[in-house]
Image: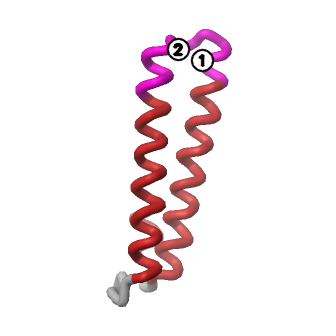
Amino acid sequence: MAEGSEYGSNKQFIRFLWIAKGSCAEVRSMLFVLYSLEKIDSEIFNTLNEECLEIAKEIYHFIKYLEKSTLDIK
């Protein structure tokens, strides 16, 4: 996200935020793989999965805020 903020516009920053949100989904899919292979237990899986979901939700709300905002990231 730091990289996206250096492009000088909300549109570009929002693009990088969507990429970051997608990365959360990738991490979650790897958690499912690790859990199914019994490399992590259910407690670790649940904790990390919930954290990923929360981060993705916060990124989404930030995107929606920026889309409505007249403040431009520079």
The x and y percentages for residue 29 are 64, 34
45 drawn magenta: yes
Comparing 60 with 34, the one in front is 60
Q: Which residue is mark 2?
A: 40
Q: Residues within 10 Å of mark 2 (few under 14, many from 20)?
A: some
Identify the image quadrant of the C terminus. Answer: bottom left
Q: Residue at x 52, y 67 (%)?
A: 16
Q: Residues within 10 Å of mark 1 (few under 14, many from 20)?
A: some
* Element type where label 1 sits in the image: helix
Identify the image quadrant of the N terminus. Answer: bottom left
The x and y percentages for residue 41 are 50, 11
**Residue type at tag 1:** Tyr
Q: Residue at x 36, y 82 (%)?
A: 73
Identify the main secondary structure in magenta: helix
- The answer to whether 17 is drawn above or below residue 41 in the figure is below
Left or right? Give the position of 6 relative to 24. Answer: left
* Element type where label 2 sits in the image: loop
Q: What mark, if any, has residue 22 been given in the picture?
A: none
In space, the residues marked 2 and 1 are separated at their CA atoms by 5 Å
Q: What mark, if any, has residue 35 been given in the picture?
A: 1
Q: Residue at x 47, y 61 (%)?
A: 60
Magenta stretch bounds:
33-47
Left or right? Give the position of 3 relative to 73. Answer: right
Q: Residue at x 49, y 32 (%)?
A: 49
**Residue type at tag 2:** Ile
Based on the displayed image, in which of its 4 quarters is residue 37 positioned? top right
Furthest toward the bottom, the residue is 70
The x and y percentages for residue 9 are 45, 85
